[in-house]
Image (cartoon, helix red, strand yellow):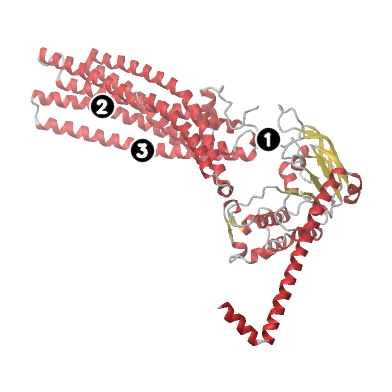
Amino acid sequence: MTKERGTSTLSHLTLGQIVRTLSGSIRENKRNSIIAPVFVAGEVVIECIIPFFTSLLINDMQAGTEMRSIVIYGAILALLAVISLGFGTIAGIACSIASTGFARNLRHDMFASIQRFSFSNIDRFSTNSLVTRLTTDTQNVQMAYMQIIRSAVRSPLMIVFAAVMAFVSGGPMAILYVVVSFMLGAGLLGIARIVMPIFRRIFRKYDRLNESVEENVSGIRVVKSFVREDYEKQKFERASGELFHDFWGAERILAWNQPFMTFAVDIIYTFVIYFGSRAIVSSAGTAMQVGQMSALITYGFSMLMSLNMLSMIFVIITMSEESARRICEVLIEEPDLANPENPVFEVPDGSIDFDDVSFRYNADSDRMALSDVNLHIKSGEVIGVIGGTGSSKSTLIQLISRLYDATEGTVRVGGVDVRDYDMDTLRNEVSVVLQRNVLFSGTIKENLRWGDPDATDEEIVEACKLAQADEFVQQFPNKYDTYIEQGGTNVSGGQKQRLCIARALLKKPKILILDDSTSAVDTKTDKSIRAGFKSFIPQTTKIIIAQRTGSVEDADRIIVMDNGRVDAFDTPENLLRTNAIYREIYLTQNKASHDEKMGDMGAGLDSIDDARAAANKELVNALDPQANAKEVAAHD
């Protein structure tokens, strides 16, 4: 199944398929989902009986009945009202529990589905689109479900029962209600057909609006640094304005609902009152009584109000249909990666082999991200990866932990094809510190225990010392209980990198991958971290992706990547002699380092000369107080 990023492609789904997919999230709420419409039906029956007894009471009063009869009718009506209230209350409570529980399950099922996605599945959606589906779309579907199990049951039943009772009370005159109801229903259906495409556009624009907000908030420091607030506001206003115009267009059409309904009600009342009153007066109450006309008006009003409610429900369901499709898109999406039938549950060692591996991110892509990669890495080796931007360094290591599957060829870990492993087993033995370091809201301890949930405080401290993180953690008032804000915004980039490295070390994996994960730390700290690896995880295969050659100078061998291909794979010494790409990177960086050192030395010499001059001046002043006094007087 191929899809455009962040857009729905399940428009071919029928309503029945959508209902079947979403009904799987009802689960424990089935009981309340049945109770609600059952008691709603009871409430409707009672409400339709009340006008009938009211008409009998009016007719008896017109005929001059006794007080005893009025009291009996009053007691019956009060009892019916209490029963109706009870039915309505039970239905309302059951409906609330069922709809909120359904929404909770729906969010849970979508979130669980997203957790099963591979990277290629996630690439088909935008983050903001997934957030919208989990929030706005789920809320729309919850509202529609609440209306379906209560109001959507109540309104049709009320129309049917009220029509039957209207015929019982008013005879042929009730035909007018039925005719008008069909006319109104056809008009409302036409309105819905017009606004439905508009709502489909609206939800796609919601994604773009959320994307604009998320991008701005997450990058607010960059926005302010480049003084781009006005540009960002214009971009937001543009997205918000498009949403406003679509909503305004849809609401302008839907606004005809109420006037259309009010006009119909007024016309019907005019006809009923005119012809009913005429029948009563001309027949002296034999053809129709006042109570019958009163009941007929009440039933007519109930029918038309129910039709009005049904039109509002139809609008809500119309709006939620696109939300339901978008939710189904997430629920139906099958993960591209799955465990084999008989997975391997043990990784023997940290050896890695790439045999004729090629890879493309998208089946429709013309260009391979990796081409003809052949690598053989021994367990326990330290491997560096060097290459220019866009050379597919990160793509290479993502195949090791099976975040993607190779398009062609085979990737083996411990001598076993990665596609034969249980994915959790493989990923627990391949620890990756990504290029974009992520810390989650919670304490430092809680973040570090992602690496090992059972890690002791001593093990946490040891891992942090090896990652050169313990020193700055100890300076925090709460030390390892310091709360990390969402995204790690209250620690620096270098601190975040070191905490992520400590988290990876706690896993004690067979393969440790650092994807440019020491770029924000100084060279001395970088060297200390690498030294810690040798003592703490000597048997672990270590792969270090780096931009600077100093980060891989201790590597046993270095992979040089160029445009998705392995240009060379050898020791640092041999690469300096034989590989032009590595030699150019090395010489460029080391020349810059040499110039920097010379600049520091020059600044140091200037500082020494200044210090010497100041010392000589102080010595002269000390030896000649008069000269010092003259200098002060001259200064004053």
Q: Is residue 6 visible?
A: yes
- Taking the image as shown, residue 47 lies to the left or right of residue 449, namely left
Amino acid type of disc 1?
A: Ser
- Taking the image as shown, residue 359 lies to the left or right of residue 241, namely right
**Separation of marks 1 and 3 at Cα, in angstroms:** 47 Å
Q: Which mark is residue 49?
A: 2
**Position above or below: 619 against 191:** below
Write down the quadrant of residue 208 in the picture.
top right
Amino acid type of disc 2?
A: Ile
Which dot, 2 or 1, sits closer to the camera? 1
Residue 630: x and y, percent? 61, 83
Residue 39: x and y, percent? 36, 32
Q: Residues within 10 Å of mark 1 (few under 14, many from 20)?
A: some
Q: Earlier in the sequence, mark 2 or mark 3?
A: 2
User: Mark 3 sits on what residue?
Assistant: 90
For the residue pair 263 and 74, the one nearer the viewer reads as: 263
**Position above or below: 346 against 62:** below
Q: Residues within 10 Å of mark 2 (few under 14, many from 20)?
A: some
Q: Earlier in the sequence, mark 2 or mark 1?
A: 2
Amino acid type of disc 3?
A: Ile
For the residue pair 554 and 449, the one nearer the viewer reads as: 554
User: Mark 1 sits on what residue?
Assistant: 120
Residue at 9 percent of width and 29 percent of height: 66
